[in-house]
Image (tube, helix red, strand yellow):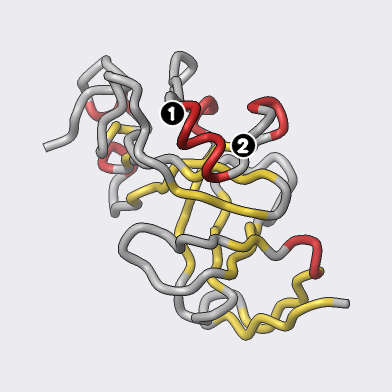
Amino acid sequence: MSVTLHSTRFGPLEIPDEAVLDFPAGLIGLGGRRYALLAREDDAAFVWLHSLDDPQLAIPVTNPWRFFGGYEVELSDEEAARIGIEDATATSVYVTVRAAESLQDFCANLAAPILIAGGRGHQIINQAPDAPVRAPLFADLAGTGDPKARAA
């Protein structure tokens, strides 16, 4: 079985039921609970977290370790239990991307990562001390030299 998504960005898409992600608490500042990750290629640096409830809503996301090798996600044991994360190695982590006209202005939100496990997604507040809301993805282009530097 599958779900048909009539995306305003990508046109009609068939999403297999097993690819549908449920976000019980939604996403910060956004509506809807059902999303799917869409990628043109398996090893794409950026993928789209597309709402199945709103055909106009698609958010670029990325695996944070592609850009930030030392990135850490910290959450309390209580928070992990609340959202059902039992095995960190079985959990995928994504961060939202703020795209811009210039690559040097692209940034990632390291403070509110999205954790996905067992068909469920949760956006959490990262307790790691060095997790900015706007970390430049291409720090060398931005001239900061520090991949976790805050963008203005």
Q: Position of residue 118 (x, y in %)?
A: 72, 48
Q: How far across and down, in percent of the image, does residue 141 sit?
A: 29, 28
* Label 1: few (<14), some (14–19) or many (≥20) C-alpha neighbours in 10 Å: few
Residue that appears at 75% across and 71% down: 15
Amino acid of disc 2 = Ile
* 125 lies above or below 2: above
Q: Quadrant of residue 29?
A: bottom left
Q: Position of residue 26 (x, y in %)?
A: 45, 63
The residue shown at (68%, 83%) is 12
**Disc 2/disc 1 C-alpha distance (Å):** 10 Å
The crowding category of the residue bearing disc 2, from other C-alpha atoms within 10 Å (few below 14, some 14 to 19, many at least 20), is some
> 71 above or below 142?
above
Compared with 112, 76 (above or below) is above
Three-letter amino acid code of the residue under disc 1: Leu
Mark 1 lies on residue: 75
CB under 8 Å between callouts 2 and 1? Answer: yes
Q: Secondary structure at mark 2?
A: loop
Left or right: 18 with respect to 108?
A: right
Position in image of residue 117 (x %, y %) = 67, 44
At horizontal 77% and vertical 76% (from top left) the residue drawn is 14
Residue 85 is tagged as: 2
Q: Nearer the viewer, residue 74 or 109?
A: 74
Which element carries disc 1, helix, strand or loop? loop
In the picture, measured across the screen, residue 132 lies left or right of residue 93, that is left
Residue in the picture at 55% in, 42% down = 115
| 20 sits to left or right of 143 | right
